[in-house]
Amino acid sequence: MSCNYESDDQECKLNGCLFFTSTKLAREFGKIADEAFRKTGFSPSHAILLYHVNLTGGIQQKEIGEILHLTPSTITRLLERLERKGFIAKKAEGKNVYLCTTPEGLAMQSEIIAAWNQLQDKYKDVLTEEETRRFLEISNKLLKSLDNRKSDKKI
Amino acid sequence: MSCNYESDDQECKLNGCLFFTSTKLAREFGKIADEAFRKTGFSPSHAILLYHVNLTGGIQQKEIGEILHLTPSTITRLLERLERKGFIAKKAEGKNVYLCTTPEGLAMQSEIIAAWNQLQDKYKDVLTEEETRRFLEISNKLLKSLDNRKSDKKI
DNA sequence: CTCCTTTGTTTGTACATACAAATATAACAT
DNA sequence: ATGTTATATTTGTATGTACAAACAAAGGAG
């Protein structure tokens, strides 16, 4: 609103900004998630990637990137480690690369799920089920709008 | 809930997870913010840091880190560039380092504010004022709970 | 069959961020 | 005054993420 430099609204400006609020929030949730997944030996992102490959064996990187909202290059980078450590195998068939489960990877699935459930429990320390529901509802709606925005631009 | 590996609930698991929802959201908002601040030549984080130093001249790094929810080391790193390019000056007085405005930095303030306002406008493309309000309300409440959680642990 | 385009993946590079350890200075106790 | 503790900052290192450019393989057009 105002352009005067010495106004006293620092807090308002920040807390009223979707960008800063959402990044702060993501970092805080990230810490809780790190904690929860630590005992699996994976970062949250790695854990979820592995989880999804276990669920949907033979999937392509592009597809999984879309599910997780991650760029192809990010997927490549995340896979580097999972592949090196033998949790996921790449089967190249011509141009296409399919992500396949391995025994080692499958063996982690139950641990990942356990950590994930534990994560949900931790959230309960911090907000009620109703609040969680409302937050997720708005967020997902928002994400959908943002996706549309993206498609609109392409046209 | 279930531990069977071939369930069809990938989307639910993800969309129902506060961590993934919030990180995805933060990345999307981040892109919009990058765009909005691009013409200032600053990343959103740099822009806000400079904005705050302009507002509260003579502030200490620790304090600004608390306002922005950023670690001291992150502040150091962000300042490196702003100082090198002459937008902020450090005045060391014994142990304490105070962040001071420079003419170059002050000159950017109105541009930063303009970009910020423009950012708010972009949000309006994507959600109504009412939705924004609700989202921010829950988020800020959440952030407060998470802060308390942190303090609780220390005790 | 050769050239061009499309599609999926990887590589190089950069950025915001954090943690842990190092450093520097001040403050306090004896 | 000396040694210890507390506070603020920096440095080294690592992570997740992205973008742009490179690469590779496939499929069409001539």
Image (tube, coloured by chain):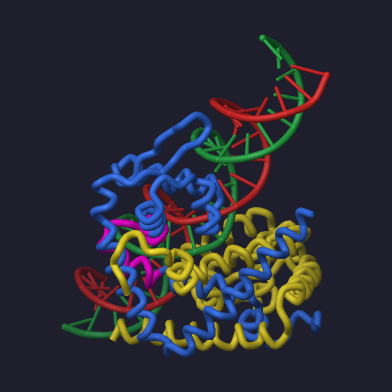
Chain colours: A blue, B yellow, C green, D red
Figure check: A24 above or below A47: below
Whether residue A39 is in magenta: the answer is yes
Q: Nearer the viewer, residue B89 or A55?
A: A55
* Residue visible at 71% across and 78% down in the picture: B127
Q: Which secondary structure is most common in the magenta stretch?
A: helix
Figure check: A125 above or below A35: below
Figure check: B122 above or below B136: above
Q: Image check: B17 left or right of B37?
A: left
Figure check: A132 above or below A149: below
* Residue visible at 70% across and 88% down in the picture: B130
Q: Nearer the viewer, residue C19 or B100?
A: C19
Q: How many marks?
A: 0
Magenta region: which residues?
A: A31-47
Res. B113 visible in picture: no
* Residue visible at 38% across and 69% down in the picture: A33
Q: Image check: A54 left or right of D27?
A: left
Whether residue A113 is in magenta: the answer is no
Q: Position of residue A26 (x, y in %)?
A: 50, 71
Q: Position of residue B97 (x, y in %)?
A: 53, 69
Q: Nearer the viewer, residue B118 or A6?
A: B118
* Residue visible at 62% across and 84% down in the picture: A11
